[in-house]
Image (cartoon, rainbow, N blue to C red):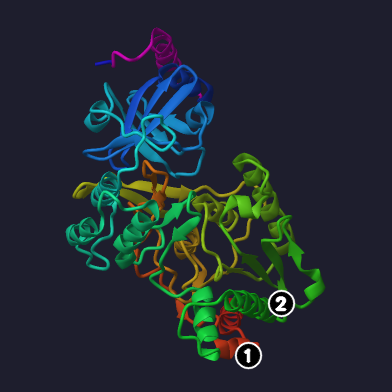
Amino acid sequence: MMSKNISILAFILIAVVVNSGCKSEKVKKIIKEANIKGTWTAPAYGVSSVVTDNEIILYQFTSDYCQEWHYEITYQEFVDSSSMSDDLNTITATFAEIKQPGFKMDRQDNLPSSCANGLLTQKGDSNYQFDPQQELDVFWQTFNEHYAFFDIEEVDWDNVYTQADAAVTSTTSEEELFIVLSEMIEPLKDFHAYLFSPTLEIDFIVNRKPDIEDIALQEFVQMNNIDDDFTDEQEQAFEAYFEEQVEIHLETVSSFFEDTDSTQFNEAETIFWNTLPGNIGYIYLSSMETEELGLEDNNIPQNITLVNQTFDRILDDLGNSNGIIIDVRTNEGGDDFVGRMLTSRLIDSDLYVYSKQARLGTQRTAEQRVTIKRYSGKRFSGPVVALTSTTTSSAAETFALTIRARDNAQIIGEATGGGLSDTLPKSLPHGIHYSVPNEFYISADGLEFEGVGVPVDQPQSFFTLAQRQSETDLGLSAAIEWVNSQQ
């Protein structure tokens, strides 16, 4: 039975498609444009959208609360980055390619009941009043319905609410509420569950594993016998110490190059590459964030173009190497598709690398398989090593999953940070932004590494004081040795 929402234009187009036996991308786009008007809901993400002529209004909701979601996306960006099912009743929205492979939104007659019952007022609305109890309840319920990993640290979220509720009164300030919310998520030890207050200009994030800054901080505290809060002078001194230690590490890496002067950089100087002895290529990738790998003033498509151009340059220079080592040990993530763009140049045929699911109540959404298509330009099919550490996080971890799925590849170093889940951005009425990790990543061989990190084939410690003092790099040395063993 055909949906009553299908327009006459779409009906005619579908008839043409059926009779011609093909469905071109142009026809699909026309059908989508003609039928995307309406209400769409993704229960697993607590997101709804109402699409009208050249306008989109987004909502974030829980069982009891609903508010407008001020996500920065235009109508055209939303339409262009969404695909539509053949029955025209489901769209897969990537939100300008940021959420990949995207989450499915089903056509609905109405918004969720919590939205129909009345929207929460937000700061900036004429009738808004700060209600700390309501803010707490929205926050708790959002995590209660969407957070996927309470079991990792065995957190009793009901008990967390009881303690937080006792700390919040009608006179609780925004700053005091921020502290309460921080204390609620701290036991999760999940760096993707974070808070940011634009008004107070403060944020909160906690790691399950120490990253390189944590390592340097512990060293600095011990060296200076600090047992209290930092003074301003000590903060500045630590920043200088940390920068110095990172520089020592990078200089150690550079000392391996055949010719340091031949090091090449991208425009933002966030990627560099060179050749190691034995004709082994080396790539240092500091981020998976397109804005950091491209240029700050560019939009996403422009930066994607720049990143592609950089990867083309790298393959032009290193494509005839005996092996390639990709260093993501200081990479804290960004956009999953950046890692897939690089891996597409390291395969000769399409490669299934992982699947994704989202929490849906006590169940999960259907698996979405992520397959990387081989790049049409220059590629490399020889031995590949990914160097990882506990600092390797988020999208850098999903990149490690792609290397794990590749033949003739190794992961060397330390198991990654253990935060693969994509972030689900949310906000509270008074303006706090926060994130709720709600997605499961499943490797090509059916394993999940949330909380523990993507494992390595060869363990090697990273960023230890002993290695920095002796100017050695055990991980890079092991990677070179493995590549040479493959010749």
Closest to the observer, 390 or 478? 390
Q: Position of residue 84 (x, y in %)?
A: 40, 28
Q: Is residue 446 visible?
A: no
Q: Is residue 6 magenta?
A: yes
Q: Is residue 206 visible?
A: yes
Q: Position of residue 122 (x, y in %)?
A: 38, 36
Task: Answer above or below: position of 186 versus 100.
Answer: below
Outermost residue to the front: 171
Q: Is residue 447 left or right of residue 387?
A: left
What label does residue 10 carry, if any? none
Local packing at callout 1 (Cα closer than 10 Å; few below 14, some 14-19, many 20+) is few
Q: Which residue is mark 2?
A: 254
Residue numbers of the magenta segment:
3-24
Q: Position of residue 256 (x, y in %)?
A: 70, 80
Closest to the observer, 283 or 79? 79
Mark 2 vs 1: CB contact within 8 A: no
Find numbered disc 2 in the image and state the secondary structure of the residue it sits on: helix
Q: Is residue 240 left or right of residue 457?
A: right
In the image, what residue type sits under mark 2? Answer: Ser
Q: Position of residue 26 (x, y in %)?
A: 53, 22
Q: Is residue 3 left or right of residue 98?
A: left
In the image, what residue type sits under mark 1? Answer: Gln
Closest to the observer, 433 or 438? 433
Outermost residue to the right: 261
Q: Is residue 342 magenta?
A: no
What label does residue 469 carry, if any? 1
**Quadrant of image for the N terminus:** top left
Task: Kindly report which numbered mark, 2 or 1, lies closer to the viewer in this rendering.
Answer: 1
* Residue displayed at 45% across by 32% down: 82
* Residue displayed at 35% across by 63% down: 450
* Residue displayed at 58% across by 74% down: 232
Local packing at callout 2 (Cα closer than 10 Å; few below 14, some 14-19, many 20+) is some
